[in-house]
Amino acid sequence: MKEKQTKESIVRAVEENDVKFVELWFTDVLGQLKSIAISPNELNTALNEGMGFDGSSIEGFARIDESDMVVFPDIDTFRILPWETKGTGNVARMICDIQTPEGKPYIGDPRFALKRMLKKAADMGYTFCVGPELEYFYFANNHSIDPIDLGGYFDLTPLDKTNDLRKQSVLGLEKMGIEIEFSHHENAPSQQEIDMRYKDALTMADQVMTYRYVVKQVALNNNVFASFMPKPIFGQNGSGMHCHQSLFKGDVNAFFDPKGEFNLSQVARQYTAGILKYAPEFTAVTNQWVNSYKRLVPGYEAPVYLSWARRNRSDLVRVPEYKPGREKATRIELRSPDPACNPYLTFTVLLAAGLKGIEEKLELPEPIEENVFEMKPEEREARGIGTLPGTLAEALALTEKSELVREALGEHIFRAFIENKKKEWDEYRTQITEYEINRYLPLL
């Protein structure tokens, strides 16, 4: 087990490893990574007092008249980046919380929103654990969608450049202290997946941010481009971030019951019912971009319908089958989120929905093992199978009315997020696309 880090051990590691810069990482409301780089001379100040910055230019942060903010490093997140920056030696990073000048947690910090929801779970006796599966694409550059391989699911070809890129990424992530279970080629050409080992939600949200950074940097170091865009290629599968979730009480998995149907406890059933009930309301958070809804269409292994099952991958929620002796692995898998989301906010709303299901003692409907995509609309309606919103505009309309999401994110983040996404939708809907030119110009 890794020895717990201290301020003194961090200062010593910086000296012993000839670290020239320490990057202080944090995220804005949209989940975009931000950084302030300091020299080792400023490290003690940052560790003890934090570093001030102007928050008015950060998306979803403070207004210009209340812009002074402080980044305060979480010493447990100190890591040395797994490559040398050309000409500048080693670089380390720490993930930070945002504070006010008075030393209080800043309500606009997505990491704080997750911490607040985890505190609610802890008060109910639970630890929230997550295992996301992030998919992504490699392209020749950042302004085209030219794949660099033609592989498919689990394919391995000797001259496959992406196989080497995945391995470099895995080694880089492991050097950053992130445990990797496996990696493989996904369904679409140039599409990949690297899976991290299940962790508590705060650690995992930090790891998701690191994962995306490392994958993109490894690609850049090899003169290609890695993209977490949900649906970059028409007619091919999009990239998802399937989220495996469970609640623990101490070392005991609260989702497991040896006598329960499918070995699911009452807590697990109520939690899953909460996810299904509130999914339409939180989808704008888990799928926050216009492009996210190009993935959430029938026929490409992306979920659209509000149902659950054990084996059926067309459902929104899948419950992997129990294996004897693997009680701690009992979990549910939500298949709708995509890898371009803000992981702090996504894990916040998932936990909020699940806990609300427990609080409301919701009943879990029967599983749907048939292919929901192939059902006729009247059959789905008769069986009470609802749908996820089909566009960002539809998702925002539901989220804006959601007391669950408002309470989970807090008023500040909730308002900033809605305002930004409405602006994005307005910019998108007024564009004239190539499809419209090709379809309508010759006709009209």
Image (tube, rainbow, N blue to C red):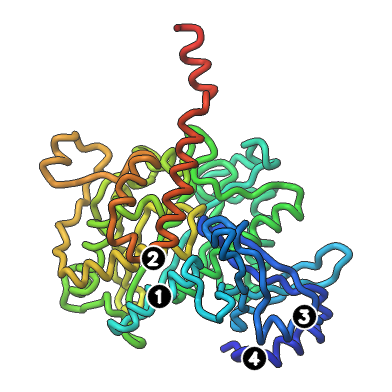
The residue under label 2 is: 410
Residue receiving disc 4 = 6
**Distance between the alpha carbons at the discs numbered 2 and 3:** 33 Å
Q: Nearer the viewer, residue 63 or 385?
A: 63
**Residue type beneath disc 2:** Gly
Going from the N terminus, do you reach mark 2 or mark 4 first?
4
Q: What's the residue type where badge 1 is placed?
A: Arg
Looking at the image, which residue is at 49% across and 28% down?
A: 430
**Residue 416 sits above or below residue 230 on the image:** below
- What's the distance in space between the residues labelled 1 and 2, CA to CA? 10 Å
* Residue 229, above or below 120: above
Mark nearer the N terminus (3 vs 4): 4
Q: Is residue 104 left or right of residue 363?
A: right
Q: Secondary structure at mark 1?
A: helix
Q: Mark 1 highlights which residue? A: 116
Residue 326, position as x, y percentages in the image: 34, 77
182 or 411, nearer to the observer: 411
Residue found at the very far front of the displayed protein:
65
Q: Nearer the viewer, residue 374 or 439?
A: 439
Q: Residue at x 35, y 58 (%)?
A: 334
Picture layout, residue 381 above or below residue 86: above
